[in-house]
Amino acid sequence: MIGRTLAAAFAIAVSLSPAHARPQHRLPSGYKWGRCLLVVHGQTRISGKCYYQIETGGDFNIQGPKQVFAGIDYPDPHSGAGEMSRDYWAVVYKDEDSWTGYSNSEIDETHADELDWGELRREGACYVGKDVKVCLWH
C-alpha cells in the first residue's frame, strides 16, 4: 500500500513539474493561431504554425510560433528598448494602390531591417515579390 501511495505521489509530482508542463500561450488581443510561410531571399523563416493579426483594410502581421509578447510573456517595458523577440515576424500592408511589407532578418531583432520588399502581388493566400513570399492561412 505504501509503495502504491509513493508511486502515485511521484507520478503527480512529475506531471506538475515545470519540465513536463505544457503552458498554453496566451495571445495578445486580436491575435489568432494560423499557418504561415515566410521566405525572404531564399531563406525559409516561418513555415507552419504561427500567430497572426489582421487589421482593418487587410494589413496583417505574422509571428513565428516561438514569439513572445510584452505584458504576457515578459513585463511590458513601455519603451522599444525593452522589447523582446524570440522568432521571425513580418508585416504586410497596403501602400496606396499596392502591397508591400517588411520583417526582421535575425530572430532577436524587434525592429525591421528589411524595409524595401518592393511591390507584392497577391497569389491566393500569399503575397509575392522579387525576393519574398508571405502566406497566411487562417
Image (cartoon, rainbow, N blue to C red):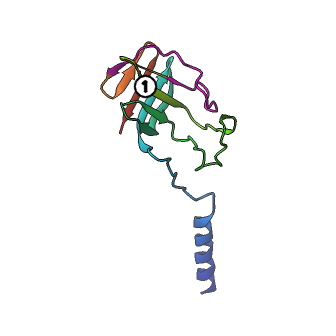
- Please indicate whether residue 91 sits to the left or right of residue 99 in the image: right
Residue 97 drawn at (x, y percent): 35, 17
In reply to whether residue 4 is colored magenta, the answer given is no
Against 107, is 26 above or below? below
Q: Where does the C terminus fall, quadrant-wise?
A: top left
Q: Which residues are magenta?
A: 102-122
Residue 37 drawn at (x, y percent): 43, 30
> Which residue type does callout 1 highlight?
Tyr
Name which residue lies at 45% across and 44% down: 31
Name which residue lies at 62% across and 72% down: 10
Q: Which residue is mark 1?
A: 93
> 131 or 22, which is in the foreground?
131
Name which residue lies at 69% across and 35% down: 81
- Please indicate whether residue 1 sits to the left or right of residue 90 in the image: right
Main SS, magenta residues: loop
- Judged from this view, the residue extending furthest toward the right is 81
- Judged from this view, the residue extending furthest toward the left is 124
- Please indicate whether residue 82 sits to the left or right of residue 57 in the image: right
